[in-house]
């Protein structure tokens, strides 16, 4: 069967969603009885859905989230210290609209990165631009950008992200030059964009990893004061998962 001329025109105009909906209508036996505007509405709705899916795919690709996480799969076990009311409030993304931050602390393996990525995934669903990075890699990339002349470009890209995740804060000491880079970035984002920080160290220990106390004050002032704080507790989720997998393997004949 030859393609209908309207189908070809829709595809040439890059209206693939409408074209797909029109193809579906050709296969509906009673479609001719449907009013024209209803048929057109179905085509427009499908085009809108297709474009929305593409935009979401682009946002998730740009986000580079470390973990495929979602708010629906969060574990609210009492031992974890994760308050469901707090997470439901954050799921509204009002904290992003109000340019607030989120700080997630707790021992290694308790799921800090998962919670951060779940919040970021929800932000992508709500049409916000997100970028994930480990703090150590961010500082390394800024150093390389300074050396190859792309520093301002990289800083501009990071500053424009609606949500920036700085994972694993405090794993390595932050030297004065790195502090200045971090200070510039956070200052550009302060009251304009939102930042998520995860760390296995409590906030009162963050000063110890930064060599310049004056810059440390300025950096933390721009992160902590308008931040929602989540403190996770309990056993390492990786350890628990590993024990479950071993138990399942042992139970198999």
Image: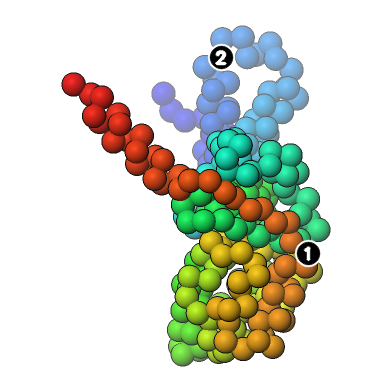
Q: Nearer the viewer, residue 228 or 7?
A: 228
Q: Nearer the viewer, residue 136 or 213?
A: 213
Disc 1 residue crowd, few under 14, some 14–19, many 20+, Cα 10 Å = some
Q: Is residue 192 above or below residue 84?
A: below
Residue visible at 78% across and 64% down in the picture = 226
Name the quarter where the N terminus is drawn: top left
Q: Position of residue 44 (x, y in %)?
A: 68, 34
The reply to whether residue 221 is visible in this rendering is yes
Q: What SS does tag 1 mark?
A: loop
Residue visible at 32% across and 35% down in the picture = 245
Q: What SS does tag 2 mark?
A: loop
Q: Quadrant of residue 152?
A: bottom right
Q: Distance between the Cα atoms at labels 2 and 1?
A: 55 Å
Q: Is residue 147 above or below residue 123?
A: below
Left of 39 or right of it: where is 18? left
Disc 2 residue crowd, few under 14, some 14–19, many 20+, Cα 10 Å = few
In this figure, which residue is indicated by the disc labeled 2? Answer: 28
In this figure, which residue is indicated by the disc labeled 1? Answer: 226
Q: Position of residue 171 (x, y in %)?
A: 48, 70
Q: Earlier in the sequence, mark 2 or mark 1?
A: 2
Left of 33 or right of it: where is 131? left
Left of 155 or right of it: where is 110? left
Q: Nearer the viewer, residue 156 or 95?
A: 95
Judged by depth in the image, the label closer to the viewer, 2 or 1, is 1
Residue visible at 35% across and 41% down in the picture = 242
Q: Position of residue 45 (x, y in %)?
A: 67, 32
The furthest residue to the left: 253
Name the quarter where the C terminus is drawn: top left
Q: Is residue 187 above or below residue 100?
A: below
The reply to whether residue 51 is visible in this rendering is no
């Amino acid at each position: 069967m030859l393609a209908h001329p309207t189908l070809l025109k829709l595809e040439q105009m890059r209206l693939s969603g409408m074209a797909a909906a029109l193809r579906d209508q050709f296969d509906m036996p009673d479609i001719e009885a449907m009013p024209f505007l209803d048929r057109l509405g179905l085509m427009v709705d499908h085009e809108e859905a297709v474009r929305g899916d593409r935009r979401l795919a682009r946002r998730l690709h740009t986000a580079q989230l470390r973990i495929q996480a979602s708010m629906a799969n969060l574990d609210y076990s009492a031992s974890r210290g994760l308050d469901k009311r707090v997470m439901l409030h954050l799921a509204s993304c009002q904290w992003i609209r109000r340019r607030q931050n989120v700080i997630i602390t707790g021992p290694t393996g308790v799921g800090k990165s998962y919670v951060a990525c779940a919040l970021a995934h929800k932000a992508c669903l709500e049409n916000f631009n997100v970028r994930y990075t480990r703090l150590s890699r961010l500082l390394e990339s800024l150093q390389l950008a300074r050396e190859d002349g792309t520093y301002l470009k990289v800083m501009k890209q990071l500053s424009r992200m609606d949500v920036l995740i700085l994972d694993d804060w405090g794993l390595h000491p932050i030297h004065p030059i790195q502090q200045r880079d971090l200070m510039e970035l956070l200052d550009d984002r302060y009251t304009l964009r939102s930042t998520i920080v995860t760390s296995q160290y409590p906030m009162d220990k963050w000063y110890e990893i930064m060599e310049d106390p004056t810059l440390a004050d300025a950096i933390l002032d721009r992160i902590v004061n308008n931040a929602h704080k989540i403190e996770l507790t309990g056993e390492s989720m990786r350890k628990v998962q590993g024990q479950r997998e071993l138990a399942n393997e042992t139970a198999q004949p």
